[in-house]
Image (spheres, helix red, strand yellow):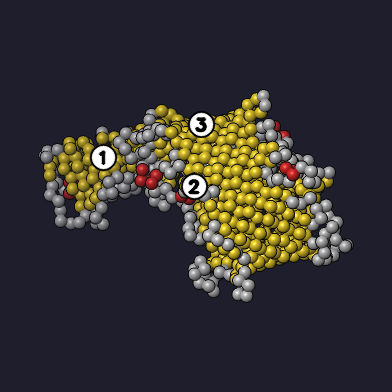
């Protein structure tokens, strides 16, 4: 509340008669700065320089800069000696901006601008103080006791915040303690501390989430989002778990623009919890880093409209954790119950109309069970790739392309089938020339043969002639016949790749596969009868004498006694999406004549009245990955279900889901979820129960959008900070 000097009012009244009669009305003066009042009765005390106005009192103050303040009440006293104006009973103060202060027994020092009041209501946009037992202001810092606040803009607000003590710095911030949030009068949760910026451009906004988990205990999770810096919006996470302790993290989300996209975040915690997962870990320091960015660094090509220009781009993608259980412990909304691998890559590229140059760093890690840590399965620093885009040979009318690359790669070394140590870096250069030509045999048939020559050199190869450079050449062909018919587009073809002996141009007869890396016939068919339906089919016939097992990936010699062993798995895929978008499904099956079913994946979503239903089902053959030792079992089936209820026009919606593994004699649920959301016109509340991986957890979130529906409609995409596994609008995973 702002007050100005009432000197003019006091001087006029004190120079008048000692007692003024009732119904005193003074005309407005011509001076731009004045004080005007009306009242039923006015009493002056000249000795004390005091004036008391009673009955329908209205005092209007107008300053030289044109601002107006109106004070109304029943009994108002102006004390010039103490530079104070006070009221007995109710008093209302309204300024020219429409801000209103209502209270009882108001006392204002118009020199120091300090004041006190009882039973007040006022506004600190966008906050409204519906009621407060008392308020006091000293040096423009206001303190309210037993206050009830809201920023709901309807007369009967949906939600309120009851605060024991609230400190206000007008147009800057509010800070409160012992706050209770109520929805429609019902207490929802308790906040020991409440803070909010009142600035039009808030430096930051803090969100609070509440969780509970058997592994981490009860958690208070805070997410503070700052204003963009250099087109990146920072985020800070500060959390506390009763079992795991304190954790912190941060993130940078790009403000979406034509030249920059992406987001990234990290999290760290010294986990004090003692549970089955952390007992397997050698270090209590747990962390995770994930995200990706794309940045158009420079463009002089107008995206290739200028034939002499170039486009420079930077791209990165990273997903790294301290242990495979990290995400399931602290970010339970994501799909990684267990993460057996991780990867990181960075690249800078230059593109023109004629060529592409790319320099990158790549790393893929696997979890070594015997060492209980991640190890780099393959690390490449750097990899340089150059590709000359296809160009026509004017003599033979063929299309030609050239690919050249260089890499410096370290690969993991195994001992007794287990990861042992990361190997030394090995430098390698590679070049490939491909020539092809298409022949239009008829309207329905196109014949496209291609040949290639591939040359690789491994520098200082320790496995070749005491560390000499190892030169390996490959030659091959791909012959394709494509036809278009009522069955769709069908490709018949033959592929052959021959590896020559190291250091020579003769055939390799010493290796188990005799240098034949690829020798197969193939058949692919793509059928799209309508714009929203497709069917894909593919298979092949292996002509080589050396193959690799579908069970464990190891090589073996194959004969010609059983031709079905040479027939590659049949792939059948079917996808459909209804024109109105209310039904879609995807089915894919791979079947091998010897190993039987290799994999089956089915997923569907459909809308029925007010319901969204999702069903998923998959099964994989017996297989053990040679690197990570990850295994799948043919007698296990994974079932996923989701059910969303969305009543028309309702303020609430509900989501349920159960994921389970079906075994020969049991059905084991590993992920159960229930979420209830309630939307007010400017607030959203959400409650989630999740039981995943034998870990029961709860989460509660409320998001108050001061300003009503306009604020909801005004949200920009980067305000949601969501990743593919998150629900839209989620600030973080829980």
Decide if residue 302 is on the left or right side of residue 401. Answer: left
Q: Are marks 3 and 1 in contact (CB under 8 Å)?
A: no
* Badge 2 density bin: few <14, some 14–19, many ≥20, Cα 10 Å: few
- Which quarter of the image is occupied by the N terminus? top left
**Visible in this render: residue 221?**
no
| N-terminal-most mark, 1 or 2 | 1
User: Would you say the residues marked 1 and 2 are in contact, meaning their CB atoms lie under 8 Å apart?
Assistant: no
Which residue is located at x 30 percent, y 41 percent?
A: 101
Q: Quadrant of residue 88?
A: top left
Helix or strand or loop: what does disc 3 sit on?
strand
Residue at the disc numbered 1: 92
Q: CA distance from mark 3 to mark 2?
A: 35 Å
Labels 3, 2: front one: 2
Kindly identify which numbered label has been placed on residue 529.
2
CA–CA distance in space, label 1 to label 2? 74 Å
> Which of the numbered marks, if any, corresponds to residue 656?
3
In this view, the mark in front (3 or 1)? 3
Residue 42 x/y as whole percent = 16, 40
Sequence-first disc among 3 and 1:
1
Foreground label between 1 and 2: 2
> From the viewer's perspective, is residue 659 above or below residue 126?
above
Give above or below for 23 relative to 511. above
Q: Residue 580's image quarter?
A: top left
Give the residue at x 73% y 54%.
519
> Image quadrant of residue 160?
top left
């Amino acid at each position: 509340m702002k007050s100005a000097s009432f000197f003019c009012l006091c001087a006029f009244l004190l120079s008048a008669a000692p007692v003024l009669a009732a119904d005193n009305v003074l005309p407005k003066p011509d001076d731009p700065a004045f004080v005007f009042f009306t009242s039923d009765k006015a009493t002056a005390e000249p000795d004390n320089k005091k004036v008391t106005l009673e009955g329908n009192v209205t005092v209007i103050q107008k300053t030289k800069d044109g601002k107006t303040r109106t004070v109304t009440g029943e009994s108002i006293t102006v004390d010039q000696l103490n530079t104070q104006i006070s009221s007995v009973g109710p008093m209302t103060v309204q300024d020219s901006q429409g801000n209103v202060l209502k209270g009882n027994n108001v006392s204002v020092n118009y020199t120091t601008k300090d004041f006190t009041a009882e039973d007040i209501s006022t506004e600190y946009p966008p906050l409204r103080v519906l009621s407060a037992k008392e308020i006091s202001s000293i040096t423009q810092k206001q303190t309210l006791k037993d206050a009830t606040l809201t920023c709901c803009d309807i007369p009967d607000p949906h939600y309120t915040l009851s605060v024991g003590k609230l400190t206000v710095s007008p147009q800057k911030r509010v800070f409160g303690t012992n706050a209770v949030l109520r929805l429609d009068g019902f207490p929802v949760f308790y906040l020991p501390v409440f803070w909010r910026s009142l600035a039009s451009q808030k430096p930051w906004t803090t969100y609070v989430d509440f969780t509970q988990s058997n592994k981490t205990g009860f958690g208070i999770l805070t997410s503070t989002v700052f204003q963009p810096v250099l087109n990146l919006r920072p985020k800070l996470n500060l959390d506390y778990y009763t079992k795991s302790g304190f954790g912190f993290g941060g993130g940078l989300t790009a403000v979406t623009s034509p030249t920059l996209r992406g987001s990234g975040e990290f999290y760290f915690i010294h986990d004090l919890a003692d549970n089955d997962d952390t007992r397997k870990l050698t270090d209590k320091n747990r962390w995770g880093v994930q995200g990706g960015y794309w940045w158009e660094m420079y463009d002089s090509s107008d995206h290739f409209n200028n034939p002499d220009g170039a486009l420079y781009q930077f791209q990165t993608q990273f997903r790294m954790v301290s242990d495979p259980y990290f995400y399931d412990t602290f970010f339970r909304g994501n799909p990684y119950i267990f993460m057996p691998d991780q990867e990181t890559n960075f690249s800078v590229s230059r593109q023109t109309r004629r060529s592409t140059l790319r320099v990158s760093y790549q790393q893929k890690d696997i979890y070594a069970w015997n060492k209980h840590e991640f190890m780099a399965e393959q690390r490449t620093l750097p990899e340089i790739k150059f590709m000359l885009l296809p160009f026509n040979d004017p003599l033979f009318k063929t299309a030609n392309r050239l690919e050249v690359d260089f890499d410096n790669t370290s690969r993991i070394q195994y001992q007794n089938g287990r990861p042992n140590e990361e190997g030394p870096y090995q430098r390698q250069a590679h070049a490939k020339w491909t020539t092809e030509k298409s022949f239009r045999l008829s309207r329905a048939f196109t014949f496209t043969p291609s040949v290639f020559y591939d040359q690789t050199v491994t520098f200082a190869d320790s496995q070749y002639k005491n560390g000499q450079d190892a030169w390996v050449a490959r030659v091959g062909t791909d012959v394709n016949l494509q036809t278009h018919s009522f069955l769709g587009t069908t490709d018949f073809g033959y592929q052959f790749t021959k590896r020559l002996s190291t250091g020579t141009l003769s055939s390799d007869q010493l290796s188990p596969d005799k240098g034949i890396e690829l020798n197969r016939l193939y058949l692919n068919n793509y059928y799209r009868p309508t714009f929203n339906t497709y069917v894909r089919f593919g298979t092949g016939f292996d002509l080589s004498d050396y193959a690799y097992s579908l069970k464990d990936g190891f090589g073996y010699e194959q004969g010609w006694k059983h031709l079905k062993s040479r027939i590659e798995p049949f792939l059948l895929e079917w996808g459909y999406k209804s024109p109105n978008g209310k039904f879609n499904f995807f089915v894919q099956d791979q079947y091998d004549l010897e190993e039987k079913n290799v994999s089956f994946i089915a997923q569907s979503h459909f809308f029925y009245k007010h319901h969204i239903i999702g069903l998923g089902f998959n099964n994989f053959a017996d297989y053990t990955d040679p690197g990570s030792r990850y295994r799948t079992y043919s007698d296990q089936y994974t079932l996923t279900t989701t059910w969303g209820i969305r009543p028309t026009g309702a303020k609430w919606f509900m989501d349920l889901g159960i994921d389970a593994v079906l075994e020969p004699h049991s059905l084991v649920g590993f992920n159960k979820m229930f979420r209830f959301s309630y939307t007010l016109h400017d607030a959203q509340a959400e409650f989630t129960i999740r039981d995943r991986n034998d870990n029961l957890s709860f989460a509660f979130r409320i998001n108050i959008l001061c300003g009503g529906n306009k604020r909801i409609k005004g949200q920009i995409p980067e305000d949601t900070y969501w990743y593919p596994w998150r629900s839209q609008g989620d600030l973080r995973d829980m």
